[in-house]
Amino acid sequence: MPHRSRLSGFIIDCNTGDLDDDADFWAQALGCSVADRDAGDATADYQMLGDTPGELHIEVQKVGHPSRVHLDIETDDVDAEAARLERLGAKKVAFVKRWWVMEAPTGQRFCVVKSKYPDRGVAWNAWD
């Protein structure tokens, strides 16, 4: 099925007791601002950074696993993009709410998410 995808941005996973302090640190470290302290929902704690380089989507996320950074690939068709990445050697790890957590053949975890701002950002890659 034809679809589009591109790098969306980075999620900074923090195993933390104080997401406000962590978001403030990363905003200052990256020369950004905290654009939305309530970017998550009832089951997820996120804070979205603003004024990011190249309009990259960068969020600081409170997690229960060890702290790390992962990237998100955004798409107009989450299932088609996950299938394309499987053909390249990635594995599906879990479907969470609306996105796939995947693992690259090299071991890194990443997410395939629905595009939030399809008319902003860098050019899309088109896939058959």
Image (tube, grey):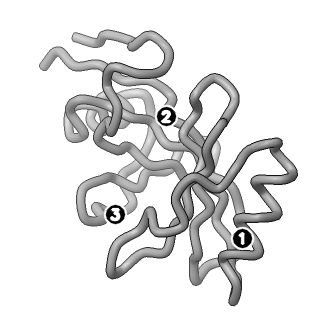
SS class of the residue under badge 3?
A: strand
Circle 2 sits on which residue?
Answer: 8
Residue pictured at 52% horizontal, 59% vertical: 36
The amino acid type found where label 2 is placed reads Ser
Residue 37 at x, y percent in the picture: 54, 66
Q: CA distance from mark 1 to mark 2?
A: 20 Å
Q: Quadrant of the N terminus?
A: top left
Residue pictured at 58% horizontal, 54% vertical: 59
Residue pictured at 64% horizontal, 43% vertical: 106
The amino acid type found where label 1 is placed reads Ser
Circle 3 sits on which residue?
Answer: 94
Residue 73, above or below 62: above
Is residue 127 found left or right of 66 in the rendered image?
A: left
- Disc on the earlier residue, 1 or 3: 1
Q: CA distance from mark 2 to mark 3?
A: 19 Å
The amino acid type found where label 3 is placed reads Ala
Task: Report crowding for label 1: few under 14, some 14 to 19, many 20 or more residues within 10 A (C-alpha).
Answer: some
Viewer-side label of 1, 3: 1
Q: Where, by quadrant of the figure, is residue 19 drawn?
A: bottom right
Circle 1 sits on which residue?
Answer: 67
Residue 54 at x, y percent in the picture: 63, 23
| Of 89 and 116, the residue lying toward us | 116
